[in-house]
Image (cartoon, rainbow, N blue to C red):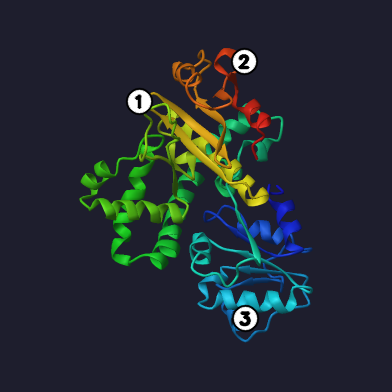
């Protein structure tokens, strides 16, 4: 598959460096190699800091400048990586294009200084989603495979339950060893692992730090910091509430979702909601990374606990709202309530059935999720 950001990355490389971050094992290296004439990790253009010989070559400044595209993988593990890339880019920008890939730490460390400011564009690579897999003609098999095995390439294309379970265990081990150990104190890793294991149960819910604090017997500030760490390494993400001035809406509470929605298979409702959340977050990040608009994914909830699952805004203006329903039910009573009180142009009620209709009184379109993906359009 040609990944959804490929064309944009190639265009940006003609003027600046391109950085690609995202979850571990989401396909960053594979994407980068696909841009070479001969996609091979043995190519001299592929410079992996984890390889001992390559590391020695980089430290000796033995860079293959005869290659039109240089790929630096995990280079952020090198203490002076920013100055290295800055020097290469400034001196050889007319000779070498530079693509940098890395795990969560690339995103984490690139924020630690501005020596590369103005010299690169940053992309967040997401797992495969329905439009990327199936285009405009999704089948039930496409949807079922994504729900069952998630959007990470290996388990999705293998499509075997045993492989999925083993991959999950191995991936978590890699994330803990390679990401957490490098970002945080080792003595907290076991507690972070425990926290990560209980988060899927809280998917789609207001995340109560106090309840987790009691379960793990830790301070409020500690739990909050731990969750931020898990967000930094792309295990989970939280979305804030959307405020409506005329209504008493939630102000601080955030809802939690997992980057790998297949971790929520124990509950069909949570699974579908996380599935939709991941598609919408990917859409928001794609618009931000390619167009520069400020996108935000939120939810709407008032003091009476009436709730709309998602609200998407663009440059601080609401664009649409989304409510997830597992069946083909009539328009949600919460949509009926908020549609006359909130300044949201259109509401989508999405499901996995066949029913499709529009109700102008409530500014609502009810449609299958596959049709919704085409209408926005998602990526």
Decide if residue 75 is on the left or right side of residue 5: left
Q: Along the line of sight, which residue is nearer the eye, 282 or 188?
A: 282
Q: Which residue is mark 3?
A: 58
Q: Residues within 10 Å of mark 1 (few under 14, many from 20)?
A: few
**Residue 150 shows up from this direction:** no
- Residue at 30% of width from left, 40% of height from top? 208
x%, y% of residue 377?
Answer: 67, 34
| Quadrant in which residue 84 is drawn | bottom right
Q: Nearer the viewer, mark 3 or mark 1?
A: 1
- Residue at 58% of width from left, 19% of height from top? 363
**Mark 2 to mark 3 CA distance (whole Å):** 59 Å
Secondary structure category for the residue under label 3: helix
x%, y% of residue 169?
Answer: 43, 51
Q: Nearer the viewer, mark 2 or mark 3?
A: 2
Q: Along the line of sight, which residue is nearer the eye, 193 or 374?
A: 374
Q: Which residue is mark 1?
A: 305
Decide if residue 69 is on the left or right side of residue 273: right
Q: Which residue is mark 2?
A: 358
- Residue at 66% of width from left, 67% of height from top? 119
Going from N to C along the chain, the mark reached first, 2 or 3, is 3
x%, y% of residue 305?
Answer: 35, 25
Q: In the rendered image, which quarter contains the C terminus?
A: top right
Determine whether 190 is above or below 195 in the image: below
Determine whether 56 is above or below 138 in the image: below
């Amino acid at each position: 598959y040609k990944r959804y950001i490929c064309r944009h990355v190639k265009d940006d490389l003609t003027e600046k460096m391109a950085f690609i971050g995202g979850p571990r094992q989401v396909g960053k290296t594979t994407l980068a190699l696909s841009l070479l004439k001969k996609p091979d990790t043995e190519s001299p253009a592929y410079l992996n800091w984890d390889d001992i010989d390559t590391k020695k070559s980089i430290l000796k400044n033995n860079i293959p400048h005869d290659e039109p595209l240089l790929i630096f993988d995990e280079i952020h593990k090198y203490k002076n990586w920013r100055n290295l890339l800055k020097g290469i880019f400034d001196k050889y920008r007319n000779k070498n294009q530079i693509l940098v890939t890395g795990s969560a730490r690339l995103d984490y460390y690139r924020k630690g200084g501005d020596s590369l400011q103005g010299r690169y564009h940053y992309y967040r690579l997401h797992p495969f989603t329905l439009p990327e897999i199936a285009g405009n003609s999704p089948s039930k098999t496409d949807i079922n495979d994504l729900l069952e095995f998630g959007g990470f390439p290996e388990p999705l294309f293998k499509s075997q339950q045993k492989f999925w379970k083993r991959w999950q265990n191995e991936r978590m081990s890699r994330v803990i060893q390679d990401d957490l150990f490098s970002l945080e104190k080792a003595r907290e890793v076991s507690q972070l692992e425990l926290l990560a294991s209980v988060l899927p149960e809280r998917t789609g819910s207001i995340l109560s730090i106090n309840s987790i604090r009691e379960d793990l017997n830790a301070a409020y500030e500690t739990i909050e910091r731990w969750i931020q760490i898990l967000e930094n390494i792309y295990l989970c993400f939280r979305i804030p509430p959307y405020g409506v001035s005329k209504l008493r809406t939630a102000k601080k509470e955030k809802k939690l979702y997992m980057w790998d929605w297949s971790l929520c298979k124990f509950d069909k409702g949570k699974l579908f909601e996380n599935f939709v959340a991941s598609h919408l977050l990917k859409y928001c990040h794609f618009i931000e990374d390619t167009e520069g608009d400020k996108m935000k994914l939120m939810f709407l909830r008032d003091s009476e606990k009436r709730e709309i699952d998602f609200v998407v805004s663009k440059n601080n203006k609401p664009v649409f709202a989304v409510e997830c329903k597992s069946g083909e039910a009539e328009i949600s009573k919460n949509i009926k309530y908020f549609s006359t009180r909130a300044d949201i142009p259109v509401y989508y009620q999405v499901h996995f059935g066949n029913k499709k209709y529009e109700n102008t009184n409530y500014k609502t379109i009810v449609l299958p999720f596959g049709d919704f993906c085409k209408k926005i359009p998602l990526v």
